[in-house]
Amino acid sequence: MTDVNTRVQRHRDALRRAGLRPVQIWVPDTRRPDFEAECRRQSRLVALADRGDRDLHDLMDAALVDMEGWSEK
């Protein structure tokens, strides 16, 4: 193993000893040319679905009232 590979393996071994395990996750590729358009498409669908949801509006209004004092000015 090269020096870099040895250090990486030691680091991974230490993480495993600490009770962690590696996982692989797949995330959207933000570099794709169609990424922005797909985000807009999905956002519009959510906005349309939320527009008619009175319970959601009530929840959001209640959450806004409950935010007072959360931030430092």
Image (tube, rainbow, N blue to C red):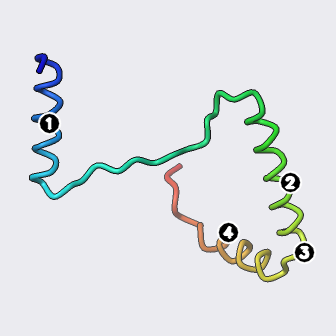
Q: How crowded is mark 4: few (under 14 residues within 10 Å), some or many (20 or more)?
A: few
Residue found 69% across the figure and 29% down from its top: 32
The residues bearing labels 4 and 1 have C-alpha atoms spaced at a distance of 44 Å
What percent of the width, then of the height, locates residue 4? Answer: 16, 19
Name the N-terminal-most of marks 3 and 1.
1
Name the N-terminal-most of marks 2 and 4.
2
What percent of the width, then of the height, locates residue 23? Answer: 35, 50
The residues bearing labels 3 and 4 have C-alpha atoms spaced at a distance of 19 Å
Q: Nearer the viewer, residue 35 or 1?
A: 1
Q: What residue type is labelled 1?
A: His
Q: What residue type is labelled 3?
A: Gly
Mark 3 residue element: loop
Residue under pointer 3: 52
What percent of the width, then of the height, locates residue 6? Answer: 11, 26
The residues bearing labels 3 and 2 have C-alpha atoms spaced at a distance of 13 Å
Residue under pointer 1: 11
Query: Which mark lies nearer to you, 3 or 2?
Result: 2
What percent of the width, then of the height, locates residue 28? Answer: 61, 42
Residue under pointer 4: 64
Residue under pointer 2: 44
In the figure, is residue 44 to the left or right of 64?
Answer: right
Query: Which mark lies nearer to you, 3 or 1?
Result: 1
